[in-house]
Image (cartoon, rainbow, N blue to C red):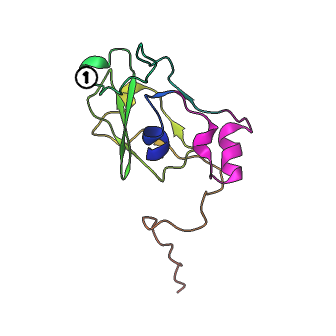
Amino acid sequence: MARHLIDEVHHGWDELGTDLLDGAPTGLRRSLTGGHEYPSRQLTGMYNTDGTPTQRELITQDGTDNLDWAYVLHPHGIEVIALQAYDRGPIVAWDTDPRSVIRADPGAWHPQSRAPIVPPRFMPRLSTSVPVTAPAHRKAARR
């Protein structure tokens, strides 16, 4: 994902498309997109007067006036920052089910709280393997 989102883009993204899901299981891809396919679009018009691409700029706190959200990629997940409310944000783990319901209210993304994400109900699991963090089921003992 880091390669797609950062390394293979000149400046930034205007829109992320279904190509971000390349390699995902067909059922999941269909569930997320409704069967629609569209490409990602990079920001355009970022060229010097000589036609060469402009350099990427580091976005600082002073340059975020028109931004609502920032996303910081970490090895363990994506930090989601509601820029108009906080300087930091909670982490959304990489293994979060992408069909989860995610609250869009910036106030819900307090950096000291868990990410406001509700796993999908009544949906088949994405993997048949039990995650390491899942509690082991115990058989009830008969007397």
Please determine whether, in this image, residue 87 is positioned above or below residue 75: above
Task: Work out whether 37 lies above or below 126.
Answer: above
Q: Is residue 64 above or below residue 56?
A: above
Mark 1 lies on a secondary structure that is helix
- What residue is shown at x 46% (from left), y 65% (from top)? 134
- Is residue 23 on the magenta stretch? yes
- In this view of the protein, which residue sits in the foreground, 13 or 34? 13
The answer to which quarter of the image holds residue 126 is bottom right
Specify whether residue 39 is painted magenta. no
Is 2 or 123 nearer to us in this picture?
A: 2
* Coordinates of residue 4 in the picture (x, y in percent): 50, 42
Q: Is residue 126 left or right of residue 136?
A: right
Report the residue at 43% width, 28% height from top. Answer: 11
Left/right of residue 79 with respect to residue 125 in the rendered view: left
**Res 38 quadrant in image:** top right
- At 65% from the left and 51% from the top, the residue drawn is 123
Q: What residue is shown at x 48% (from left), y 32% (from top)?
A: 103
Q: Residues within 10 Å of mark 1 (few under 14, many from 20)?
A: few
Q: Which residue is mark 1?
A: 61
Q: Looking at the picture, how far across and down is residue 71, in whole percent?
A: 38, 35
Query: Which of the two residues, 98 or 48, is positioned nearer the viewer here?
Result: 48
- Looking at the image, the residue that sits furthest to the right is 35
Q: Which residues are magenta?
A: 14-38
Quarter of the view holding residue 132: bottom left
Q: Compared with residue 138, is residue 73 higher up or lower down, i.e. above or below?
A: above
Q: How many numbered marks does the figure carry?
A: 1
